Image: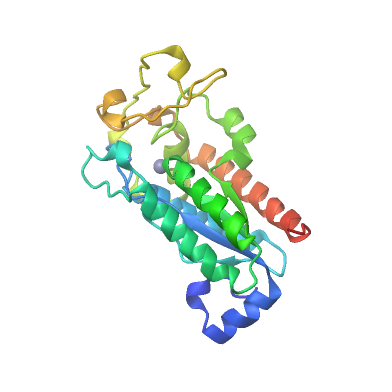
Amino acid sequence: MDKYLLEEMTWEEAKEKFKETDIAILPVGSIEQHGPHLPVSTDAFDAYWLAKETVKRVKAPNPVVLPPLNYGVSYHHMTFPGTISLAPETLISTVYDIGCSIASYRVKKLLIINGHGGNTPALKCAAQKLTYEKKLQIFIDSGEIASKERKEIVSTPNDVHSGEYETSTSLANREELVKVDKLVKAIPKFPLPCLEFSGDNKVPWVFTTDKLSKTGVLGDPTLATKEKGKKLWEAHIKNLAEFIEQLKGIKT
Ligand SMILES: [Zn+2]
């Protein structure tokens, strides 16, 4: 397979690669608390890992995977030590600058593989500017592309952070860093039913994690298994790889 990690290319190799493909992938993560049982780098590791596993499934020519952005917008976790947050403006500017650079090498489509939901508003702002100013078409996946499979596999409602879903996926790709003796169920209680994260007729809102959870967990990690994690990753990787194949044929 061709090289696909920009960080491993020389400028001459990068020049050739950008002639071969007009699709780039930017993994974006976060450094933030993930409860007492998962490492703070979970979202950053997962976004980059997912990008690499996905590109391995794509037929030649494969896209360029850009070096990841490991930090994200994590203000809502700041009361838990180890969390390091960018300001939303910093993330917007950084993604915008990266977009300007790749647009100058004839990249037309940028797929952002986002490991952290808190990054989404800033990523969309950067995308709006880049689409308007640089004619770069930007696609952001924060897991939505495999939401159907997630609903089938994960049974816990409001399982949004370090719960059944994320602990399962961590058991499947970094089992050695999961503290299985520290798994505690923490289904949040919400001030109003319409403020719950899952279900219909909800009002989106910006929350602070410590108001909803003492441990930082929002969900039920005790239901996590490696098997569920493998299935969740498989669905995500397969759906993303298929999406990239379809993207190749789209004119922007
Ligand atoms: Zn996470």
Above or below: residue 250 compared with residue 181:
below
Q: Could you tell whether 192 is left or right of 243 in the image?
A: left
Label tally: 0
**Foreground: 91 or 9?**
91
**Foreground: 28 or 234?**
28
Residue 236: x percent and y percent?
A: 60, 45
Q: Quarter-wise, where is residue 192 in the image?
A: top left
Visible in this render: residue 37? Answer: no
Q: Could you tell whether 181 is left or right of 152 in the image?
A: left
Task: Name the residue located 60 percent from the left edge and 74 percent from the top edge.
Answer: 105
Above or below: residue 248 compared with residue 77:
below
Question: On the rendering, which quadrant does ligand 1 occupy?
Answer: top left
Task: Name the residue located 28 percent from the left edge and 35 percent from the top edge.
Answer: 182
Residue lying furthest front: 133
Residue 135: x percent and y percent?
A: 64, 60
Q: What kind of colouring is applied to the model shown?
A: rainbow
Residue 115: x percent and y percent?
A: 47, 47
**Foreground: 60 or 109?**
109
Task: Name the residue located 42 percent from the left edge and 57 percent from the top edge.
Answer: 93
Task: Name the residue located 51 percent from the left edge and 66 percent from the top edge.
Answer: 66
Q: Quadrant of the N terminus?
A: bottom right
Visible in this render: residue 93? Answer: yes
